[in-house]
Image (tube, rainbow, N blue to C red):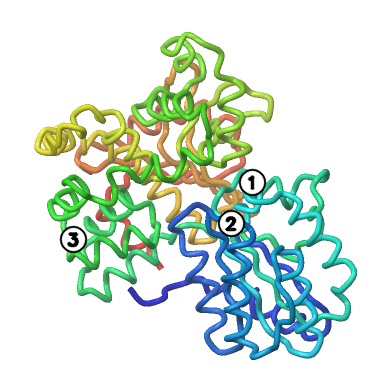
Amino acid sequence: MKFYGRQEELKELKKLYRQAKDSARMTVLTGRRRVGKTLLSLEFTRNHKFIYLFVSKKSEQLLCVEYIEEIKRIFNVPVIGEIRTFKDIFALLLEISRKEHFTLIIDEFQEFYNINPSVYSEMQHLWDVNKNRSKLNLILIGSVYSLMYKIFQNSKEPLFGRADRFLFIKPFAIKNINVILGDYGVSDLKTVFDYYVFTGGIPRYIDSLTANSAFSYKKIVDFALRTNSPFINEGKNLLIEEFGKEYGTYFSILELISVGKTARSEIESILERNTGGYLERLEKDYDIISKHKPINAKPNSRLQKYRINDNFLNFWFRFIYRNHSTIETCNFDYIKDLLERDYATYCGRILERFFHELFADTGRYNRIGSYWERGNQNEIDLVAINDMRKVIVISEVKLNKSKIDIETLKLKSRRLLSVYRAYKPEWLGLSLDDARKYIR
């Protein structure tokens, strides 16, 4: 798959590269695995000199042997004596950068925590001493979000405050998915939506589907649910390293959220344990879930629901992890039948998220969310507000447009509108066919 999107990120990286001609710059790229961080950095360096170092799970001495060979290949410099520490590797590259302007990419940077954590303090010292005399454009990439956040955002860590930019790379937006599929001759909104449901906009997953000509619901399902599918163990591959030995509890919580148990009280009644700490870490340390409140709720309101941010992970926990015993026996036909039965109901909530994203992308509204009252009464799927123009859009979102009743929607919105008396209301019934007018 060719390179798509990321224009704002490329613009920022180019700006930092130019600034590094005067003094060194440090940029952090993070985001979940498969989101395209490495591809972005390599696309950025296509037209200038760079060296790429990958921190694999091996000893520091073996990494240094590998890195020295790469340094010799790129810079054709003599290396006297044996270099056995990354501290000396980094010092050598800083020395080279005094005379030569180039980009250094260090991928899976958080792995030094497992190899030699003192690398971070050693780098901090070398950076502080050499930055103003160096022309190095340093890009540090990491996929374990909790560790990358700790390394650069925790005030007790040595590299705190050293990064000039902290770029969080997000999945592709719906408009990107639409462009990619259009390049393959696919223009129907149903396929765009199915890609959104199954991949969540993650480039690697989109690439896997397009490379295998999976351009319909059936072909997507056949590719995802089969022996040796790359999707089957993907959730474990992504999250076990993040969660460590307590991954079982985290997985149980995420499974419950994926099937609609979105209140803390519901989760705790099923697991029969306090989950406050786990939920807080899933939200703040791992950025995997988020709290959602009614659009007019006060900051301290307890009326809230949890949701999994990543569409792919939501799907994985709902249909793959939840049925892991069936998966183990390779009974994929059963899972496909289950998916066929539940897909429309499952996609109802995802379609709401789909339209939330589309409305946000229009730039017309400063607040977008949902609304409900205690006991999940008077639920409204989408509320979009422009406080400057005093406009409020209230919408019902359904896969089957014939089931939308605007008069009922108006009745459900009475209490909400009592808070926005000065606003001009607009009621909409939205189904997938309406999405085209919002995809830019």
In the rendered structure, which disc, 3 or 2, sits on the residue that comes first in sequence? 2
In the rendered structure, which disc, 1 or 2, sits on the residue that comes first in sequence? 2
Kindly identify which numbered label has been placed on residue 433.
none
Asked if the residue under mark 1 is in contact with the one under mark 3, i.e. CB atoms within 8 Å, the reply is no
Quadrant in which the C terminus appears: bottom left
Residue tagged by mark 1? 147
Kindly identify which numbered label has been placed on residue 214.
3
Quadrant in which the N terminus appears: bottom left
Residue tagged by mark 2? 142
- Residue at (51% x, 19% y) in the render: 264
The secondary structure type at the circle numbered 2 is strand
Asked if the residue under mark 2 is in contact with the one under mark 1, i.e. CB atoms within 8 Å, the reply is yes
Residue 346 to residue 11: above or below = above
**Separation (CA) of disc 3 from disc 1:** 35 Å
The secondary structure type at the circle numbered 1 is helix
Residue 31 to residue 46: above or below = above
For the residue marked with disc 3, what is the amino acid?
Ala
Give how far across and how far down residue 286 sits, in percent.
Answer: 57, 40
Residue 183 visible in the picture: yes
Residue 174 to residue 65: above or below = above
The secondary structure type at the circle numbered 3 is loop
Give how far across and how far down residue 85 sits, in percent.
Answer: 71, 63
Looking at the image, which is closer to me, 74 or 309? 74
**Separation (CA) of disc 3 from disc 2:** 30 Å
In the rendered structure, which disc, 3 or 1, sits on the residue that comes first in sequence? 1
The answer to whether residue 384 is left or right of residue 97 is left
Residue 417 visible in the picture: no
